[in-house]
Structures are given as C-alpha cells and as structure tokens.
Image (cartoon, coloured by chain):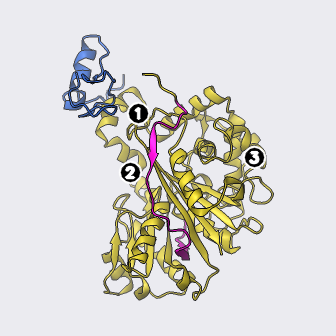
Chain colours: A blue, B yellow
C-alpha cells in the first residue's frame, strides 16, 4: 500500500461501528429494529419505515 | 426485501404547476469556452450575460430577476451583477439557478416569479473556471467529491473515486444487464465530436474523432476511454426569460417554455445507494415535462442531455422514453444522433464531452438556437427541443418550443 493512500477516519461516528466490526473480521451494516430493512449508507432513520432505532 | 431494479418504485416526480407557454427564452449567451484562461468564474459569467443581453436587445437595467448557483466558485450574484454593469435597482433573487438540473428547473421557478409579478426579465447564469483552478491544483469536481465524508469513509479507501470510476462501474453494469457495447458508447462520443467540429468555439473544434480511433485509444477506466469523459474547461452561459407576450416585442424569434419536470431518487444521494443503478431519475422527470408540453418523444426534434460520460446519453435516452429500457445502446448506433438526418439529433453543439464543460447551461443555449434556426449544426426545421439535466439523485427535463 502506498504510504499516502487515503485511509478512512475510523473514529467518525456514522461509520465508527462499521470499521470496529471490520477490525474483528466482521461485515456489519445497521438494520432497522422495526421493519428489518438494512440501512446503508448509515443514516439516522430507516428509509423504508422512518424508524429511528437502528442496530 | 425483493428489489426490482426497473420498476419505478425508487423515486418520485415533483408536482409542478402548469406553466406551459407562459414565458419564453428571449436572450441567450455564452462566454468564450477555453482551456485555463486565468479568469474567475464570475468574470466568465459576466461575459456570457453581456452577450445574452445583446442577443435579447435588453439593457442591464431591464434585468429585475437573477438566478444562480451558490457553488462551483464565484458566480454572478446580484451584487456582482450590479458591480459589473454599474446598476443598483432591486432584483428578485434565487439561488436555485445555474447549470445541471437547475438549468431546466430555473424555468419553472422563473415562470412563477413572472406570473406573480416579482420580475419581468429573469436571468439565469452559470460559469466555471475549473481549467484555471486545475492548473493551480485547487478546486474542480474531484476535489469537491473528495471532501464529502461518506465518500472519504466508504468509497475512496476502496478506490471507488473519482467520477470516471463511478460511471465506468455503472457502464459495466449496463453492459452486463443489457448487452450494451463499447462501439455503442463510442457512437455517442463520435456524434458529440462531429457536432463540436461543426461548432466554432467548441473546445474540441478542429479535432475529429472516428469510431476506429476511439476503439484504438487506451482505456483509462474500463470501459471508458478518454473520449467517454467530459472536458474540464473554463466557460459559462446565460439565458433570459420573459413573459411570452413581452417576448413577441423583442428582437429574437420566440422560443417558449413548454414543459418542465423534476425527478428524484428516494434511495439516497450517493451513486452506490442507487437501487436502480443503471437508470436515472429522468424516469420521473420526463413524463411530467412532456405532458405539460403536450408532446410525445416522437415529436422531439433535438435533444441535449447533461453528459458527463457517454453512458449518461444512453441511460437518459432510455429513461425519457425515446426507446425501451436497455435498448439505448442499439438506439444510438451509427448516425442515429446526427444533427442532419439522425433519428434523434443529440447534443448538437458537442455537449460536455466535446463542446465545453459548463454543466448544462450551454445545452439550453443550444436548444434555443436550434429552435430559432441559428445553430451551427442546425437540425432542419427544428420545432421542439429538450434539455435533460442530471445530478445523480435528481434529473430534470425542460421542453422548449418554437412559436
């Protein structure tokens, strides 16, 4: 890898958990607790049902 | 969840009031289109506006409405307009003007402003100095995208950056789904270059391109060659809109605003989030605009489309209903897009690929000239013309008609 290759800010809140899980070898994206829709890219609310609980 | 990529369940049209025939485009102008010129975008816009005023036979003091875009470098806002022309009168102002989708939707907002008596003569203007800024290693379309945090976090680290890479991916998918070929992409590039070679002032004027030369050129991001990608240039454009009755007393043949539409994706603002990856929101924009104008795709004599890459022509031609989805590739083959005898004369000035990278404002200028019979690569007896604007999650359609 080039020394100047742009790396993501793994502390940026919207993607912090994504990169933390990736570090453990997991691919994880948020899912709406209410309707089960995967919400990616990360958002505050579910696009399908408007639910605000995403885990 | 089952996803149907081509069912129209991934976006919507904005409900627009019917403004058909209420206003006309009475003046058009372009700046010089150049490589790095050392000018600011504001200076470039002012030159385009001077020419649009001359074209219309109006004075700076007649312009009492101004529309521009609050991005892409300094633009000719109301203060800059007054400084440049030495005027000081009150103006109706909208920041929802400029190029891209707004080069079409500005006509709807201007029609309402004129209807409500807020302005009589509304100017829409846009300019960029990206060639100059690139030579100074600042600004430009790549840098603005690089500053976007989701792209920084989720796209750039994987190499999905900048714009040619996004749209090469979309083109690959279109080729996979529909069998679109390299030669069909090339046909779009060759048509644009042919028209630019007929258009004095086009950045690529005097530089012919054959399909064989296109196919023999190196790939920069598969399947794109350099000629699949838009220029980076300095330039701008402007057009002036007035009530249709007033337009009849002015200098130029009357070209009226017949229909306007705006469509939006509901699946996110990033390309990676587009559920309909090989479609554009023209699916939602075009039907309303055509309906407002009372025309069908077969009535259209000349089409200009916001065309950062060749694949955008094919996708939007499909999505506006000129052919079925997936048949855009075969549709554009050969001389289909030619100004003289083509089934759908397309980007008759050369578009963003070969005329100038001014983000659609010159496309509107070109349609107006075609409908007046004043274009360089004139479509015989053109009466109905369309500009299709595009930003990714949004697309717009402007139908213009010779009266």
Front position in the image: B253 or A48 = A48
Q: Do marks 1 and 2 share a chain?
A: yes
Region in magenta: B5-33
Vertical placement of residue B126 versus B137, above or below = below
The reply to whether residue A12 is in sight is: no
Q: Would you call the spot at circle 1 few (<14 residues within 10 Å), some (14-19), or many (20 or more)?
A: some
Residue B23 belongs to magenta span: yes
The reply to whether residue B311 is in sight is: yes
**Residue B127 screen position, x and y as percent:** 45, 65
**Residue A16 screen position, x and y as percent:** 21, 26
Q: How many marks?
A: 3
Residue mark closest to the camera, 1 vs 2: 1
- The residues bearing labels 3 and 1 have C-alpha atoms spaced at a distance of 36 Å
Ranked by sequence position, the earlier of labels 1 and 2 is 2
The quarter of the image holding the N terminus of chain B is: top left
**Residue A42 screen position, x and y as percent:** 28, 30
Residue mark closest to the camera, 3 vs 1: 1
Residue drawn at point x = 67 percent, y = 38 percent: B217
Q: Is residue B36 left or right of residue B198?
A: left
The residue that mark 1 highlights is B273
Residue A50 belongs to magenta span: no
Vertical placement of residue B50 versus B1, above or below = below
**Chain of the residue on which disc 3 is drawn:** B
Q: Would you call the spot at circle 2 few (<14 residues within 10 Å), some (14-19), or many (20 or more)?
A: few
Label 1: which secondary element: helix
Q: Is residue B249 left or right of residue A38?
A: right
The residue that mark 3 highlights is B210
On residue B137, the disc is 2
Q: Tell me where residue B400 sits by quadrant.
A: bottom right
Q: Do marks 3 and 1 share a chain?
A: yes
Mark 2 and mark 1 in contact (Cβ < 8 Å)?
no
């Amino acid at each position: 890898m080039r020394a100047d290759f742009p790396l993501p800010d793994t502390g940026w809140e919207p993607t912090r958990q994504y990169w933390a899980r990736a570090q453990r070898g997991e691919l994880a994206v948020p899912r709406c607790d209410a309707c089960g829709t995967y919400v990616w890219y990360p958002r505050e609310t579910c696009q399908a049902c408007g639910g605000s609980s995403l885990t | 969840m089952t996803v149907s990529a081509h069912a129209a369940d991934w976006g919507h049209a904005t409900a627009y009031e019917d403004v058909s025939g209420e206003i006309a485009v009475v003046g058009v102008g372009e700046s010089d289109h150049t490589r790095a010129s050392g000018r600011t975008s504001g200076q470039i816009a002012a030159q385009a506006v001077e020419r649009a005023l001359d074209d219309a036979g109006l004075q700076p003091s007649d312009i009492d409405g101004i529309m521009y875009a609050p991005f892409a470098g300094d633009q000719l806002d109301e203060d800059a307009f007054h400084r440049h022309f030495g005027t000081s009168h009150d103006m109706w102002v909208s920041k929802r003007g400029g190029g891209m989708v707004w080069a079409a939707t500005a006509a709807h907002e201007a029609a309402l402003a004129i209807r409500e008596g807020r302005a009589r003569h509304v100017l829409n203007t846009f300019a960029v100095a990206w060639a100059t800024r690139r030579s100074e290693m600042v600004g430009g379309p790549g840098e603005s995208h690089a500053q976007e945090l989701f792209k920084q976090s989720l796209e750039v680290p994987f190499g999905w950056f900048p714009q040619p890479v996004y749209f090469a991916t979309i083109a690959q998918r279109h080729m996979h789904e529909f069998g679109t070929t390299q030669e069909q992409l090339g046909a779009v590039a060759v048509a644009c270059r042919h028209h630019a070679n007929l258009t004095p002032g086009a950045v690529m004027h005097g530089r012919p391109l054959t399909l064989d030369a296109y196919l023999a050129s190196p790939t920069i991001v598969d399947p794109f060659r350099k000629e699949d990608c838009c220029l980076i240039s300095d330039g701008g454009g402007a057009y002036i809109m007035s009530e249709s009755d007033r337009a009849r007393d002015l200098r130029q043949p009357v070209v009226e605003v017949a229909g306007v539409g705006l469509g939006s994706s509901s699946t996110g603002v990033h390309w990676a989030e587009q559920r309909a990856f090989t479609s554009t929101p023209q699916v939602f924009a075009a039907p309303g605009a055509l309906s407002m104008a009372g025309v069908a795709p077969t009535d259209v004599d000349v089409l200009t489309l916001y065309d950062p890459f060749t694949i955008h022509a094919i996708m939007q031609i499909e999505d506006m209903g000129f052919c079925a989805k997936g048949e855009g590739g075969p549709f554009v083959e050969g001389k289909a897009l030619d100004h003289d005898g083509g089934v759908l004369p397309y980007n008759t000035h050369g578009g963003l690929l070969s005329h100038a990278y001014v983000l659609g404002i010159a496309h509107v200028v070109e349609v107006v000239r075609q409908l007046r019979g004043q274009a360089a690569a004139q479509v015989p007896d053109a009466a109905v013309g369309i500009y299709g604007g595009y930003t990714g999650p949004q697309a717009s359609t402007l139908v213009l008609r010779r009266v």
